[in-house]
Amino acid sequence: MTDFVTADCGIRQLHARFVDAVWRQDATAFSDCFAPDGIWKIAGMVMTGREEIAEACGKLLGRCERIQLVVGQPILEVGEGIAIGRLQVTEFAKKHDGTSAITFGTYYDRYVEQDGAWRFQWRHWTMAYHGPTDLSGGFVVPSDYGAFPGMPGVDEPTFVRKA
């Protein structure tokens, strides 16, 4: 149980660093949340490695004046230096044109412990809603991977929103 509690604490700190990097629009700190060969899958894109992740993150964050992420409690399964998890995320975004949007979704994660810190080895974003903050936009019916530890396949693509 001690190993699980230690991993849970470390993974929650990883999520906190991720949220902080997004708020501060720090693409380098964002990419440092990933393993050197980490993979980030979001909106039909697949980025591999910190450099590619930082570049994509900078472009995505640049679309908004400010983004606040609110993460739920992770569901985890912990092994020897690795873990898998599922995490609900709400994103509030204020765009440069003054409009705002809210997004709901789930991150499916594979974590690895490296040099005393937990990092994302693989992140798969599944969006359920993106639209006006009054929730008047349409919800997406995401793929159902079943109860945890159900996860998308490594090669499964992420949803691309049609605007």
Image (spheres, rainbow, N blue to C red):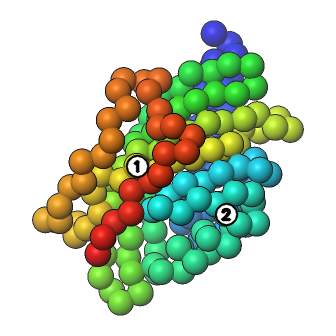
Quarter of the figure with residue 92: bottom left
Instruction: Give the labeled residue for mark 1.
Output: 126
Give above or below for 68 relative to 62.
Answer: above
Is residue 102 visible in the rendered structure shown here?
Answer: no
Instruction: Give the labeled residue for mark 2.
Output: 53
Q: Quadrant of the C terminus?
A: bottom left
Say whether residue 130 is left or right of residue 64. left
Q: Position of residue 112 (x, y in %)?
A: 72, 35
Circle 2/circle 1 CB separation < 8 Å: no
Q: Position of residue 10 (x, y in %)?
A: 67, 34
Q: Real-space Cα distance between discs 2 and 1?
A: 18 Å
Q: Which residue is found at the position 47% from the left and 24% from the top? A: 149
Foreground residue among 57 and 9: 57
Q: Which residue is found at the position 77% from the left and 50% from the top? A: 37
Q: Which residue is found at the position 29% from the left and 82% from the top? A: 99
Foreground residue among 66 and 54: 54
